[in-house]
Amino acid sequence: MSRIHVIHENPAWLPPLAAALEQRGLPWQEMFLHTGAFDLAAPPPEGIFYNRMSASSHTRDHRFSAEFTAAVLAWLTRWGRTVVNGPRALDLEISKVRQYAALEAAGLRTPRTMMVAGRGEIVAAAERHFAGQPVILKPNRGGKGLGVQLFHTIEGLRSHVEGEDYIEPVDGIQLLQHYVQAPRPVITRAEFTGRRFTYAVEVDTSEGFELCPADVCAIGDAACPVGETAGRPEHKFTVIEGIDPGLRGRLERFLEQAGVDVAGIEFIAGPEGAPLVYDVNTNTNYNPEAEARAGIAGTNRSGMGALAEYLGALLAGSQRLAA
């Protein structure tokens, strides 16, 4: 039977999507990729495949799930299966360096960033390129905010890097990033489904960069530790009418060029007011409280509703082609 196959490694993210698919009577099943075996000479199951693999999989003891998923996606595409957020999207999900390269190539500005390999190189790079400026240290491959910190002085950075609390990044690459002081304490997260704008959310950052919108997220320092619980300020996430049309068009063109189908793209206003894009989340989540306040919860205008409709249309198209 042709169905929607949801590729993932974190059951905590699955229920909202499952509810949206079942509400619409769409046949689906999960494809949990932590361990498994696939015959490369045999055709994959019929249907379409939605990749929700996360860059933070290694923080849930699924160290090689992303690499396993990359191999499975190669198998699926070899057999001509429709894959939503295919190999190119996964490649961006697990590397901010590659995200920034793709964004800049599409004409989108990103914060000034240095990539550093080697613990002993970090402080010297900060001294050389960010002397006297606040700097953010973050892993190239994200994961629950581990290792993401803001340092106002070189001395503070040195103390951390040389201390026992320092965490080695899973891929060996750290990023040193210029700290952007926005005119307003907000960031904007624009959601896209089928490479087209769905809606945007303003996130209040006055109490820190807690940016993951999912109901199960309790976040520190611009990351998403699903499975840990903590309170969040009321109305931290607010659905807004839209974003600048020019920026919206550039972001949609970026998704087309990058081969990304579903994403949440986060940006912040720089010192001159121009937007700086700093994260492309191809495993995007949505905030149900903000959607409820905006009157779109459970509708086709909600994040999961729009996603389920999109996947359903792709499934129907693949079924017609197979008939």
Image (spheres, rainbow, N blue to C red):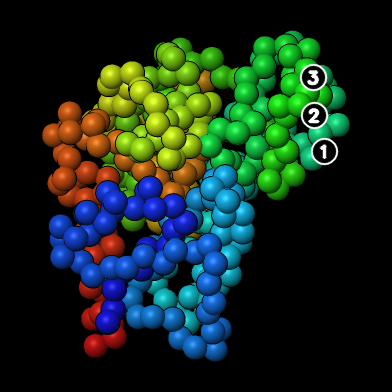
Q: Amino acid at mark 1?
A: Gly
Residue at the image position 31 percent from the left and 26 percent from the top? 237
Give me the C-alpha separation between circle 1 and circle 2.
7 Å
Position of residue 275 measured from the top left corner of the image (x, y, whole percent) = 47, 27
| Residue 122: image tag | 2
Would you identify the image quadrant in which residue 51 lies? bottom left
Neighbor class of circle 2 (other Cα within 10 Å; few <14, some 14-19, many 20+) is many
Task: Report which residue position mark 1 lands on.
Answer: 118
Residue at the image position 56 percent from the left and 83 percent from the top? 40
| Above or below 293: residue 43 | below
For the question of whether residue 238 can be seen, the reply is: yes
Position of residue 65 measured from the top left corner of the image (x, y, whole percent) = 56, 59
Left or right: 83 in relation to 233:
right
Left or right: 166 in relation to 189:
right
- Mark 2 and mark 3 lie on one chain; the one further toward the N terminus is 2
Neighbor class of circle 3 (other Cα within 10 Å; few <14, some 14-19, many 20+) is some
Task: Report which residue position mark 3 lands on.
Answer: 158
Residue at the image position 28 percent from the left and 19 percent from the top? 234
